[in-house]
Image (cartoon, helix red, strand yellow):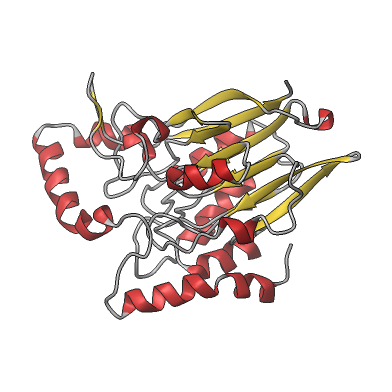
Amino acid sequence: MRPPIELEQRLTCRRRAEELHRKGRRAHGRGDYILRHDRLVGPVLRTALRAAGLYRRGCRNAVRPVVRHTSVRIPRLPSSFSHFRILHMSDFHIDGVQGLAEVIAETVSANPVDACVLTGDYRFATEGEYDLVLPRMRTVLSGVQSHYGIIGVLGNHDCADLAVGLSKIGVRMLINDAIELRKGGDSIWIAGVDDPHYYGCDDLGQALEGVPERSTRILLAHSPEIYEEAASAGIQLYLCGHTHGGQICLPWLGPVILNAKCPREYTYGAWHHRSLQGYTSAGVGCSMLPVRYNCPPEVTVLELVTD
């Protein structure tokens, strides 16, 4: 695990942005619509769902995760990493749904993997106290069985202090940084950037400093919105979340809100952009309201395979 002083240095941009937000300035990234409107939209939507008799059903759906398995064919993947399994989880908002941490811990305990990656949004609110987040994340992570440990990035709901707290409970936090995973004489690299959506503190160039040009590169980012930069940087696999897959999806019509500045097909599940492959998770938790409709919470197990 990296020394705390290095993590603090990499959090400088984020802490500066958070200070500006406290002074009234908002959003340095690619969007802030939901953060500016959820105090109005949330209560109105809750009232409408209760009036329709659907609210309790949505709450039950929110604690019924599914495990999705998918294979990803990676060009030039070192043979030692063929069938390498990655557990991907995102958008926990873990203090927003009672009992979710225990359910997720049980779910992932049945799925041992080589590596586990987390793509941000550990807290439900965007400001104020977060006392329940780290204890509940500790519960979630107690179920993870990962040979190469747990690697994470921050999301738009998170604060810099959460990166420090998560590192203390065993998560290798990547703040515009990268880590090499070695197996035999081979290696792959996992890079992670700070939140590109709201804080705009992502720096892919800095994250890839020292990463060999022709190496296998996997990128962790909170949202799918830097797909163009990732493709240009030679990233082979881009893992992200943020959109919740819509969280509330209407029959035949799909998600009501996705809140990401990217093509719609990049906002859920597997996608491609030029030579880049991506996977956008529907997320573990819920934002705004602790409900889900036609879009269950998910944990994803990705298996890397060679050409």
For the question of whether residue 174 can be seen, the reply is no
Q: Which residue is found at the position 41% from the left and 45% from the top?
A: 242
Measuring from the top left, give residue 248's x and y in whole percent: 27, 34
Rendered view: 154 above or below 6: above
**Between 236 and 146, which is closer to the camera in this rendering?**
236
In the visual, does 211 lie left or right of 36? right
Work out whether residue 306 or residue 282 is closer to the camera in this orientation and state it. Answer: 306
Coordinates of residue 265 in the picture (x, y in percent): 38, 29
Q: Residue at x 27, y 77 (%)?
A: 24
Residue at image coords 45%, 32% = 65
Q: Is residue 132 visible?
A: yes
Rendered-image quadrant of the N terminus: bottom right
40 lies above or below 114: below
The x, y position of residue 123, in whole percent, is 42, 57
> In the picture provided, is 83 more to the left or to the right than 230?
right
Q: Residue furthest right?
A: 185
Give the image location of residue 66, x and y in percent.
47, 28
* Number of on-image labels: 0
Q: Residue furthest left?
A: 51
- Quarter of the image where the C terminus is located: top right
Given residues 48 and 22, the one toward you in this image is: 22
Q: Is residue 146 left or right of residue 139?
A: right
The residue positioned 64% from the left and 70% from the top of the image is 7
Of 281 and 94, which appears nearest the observer? 281
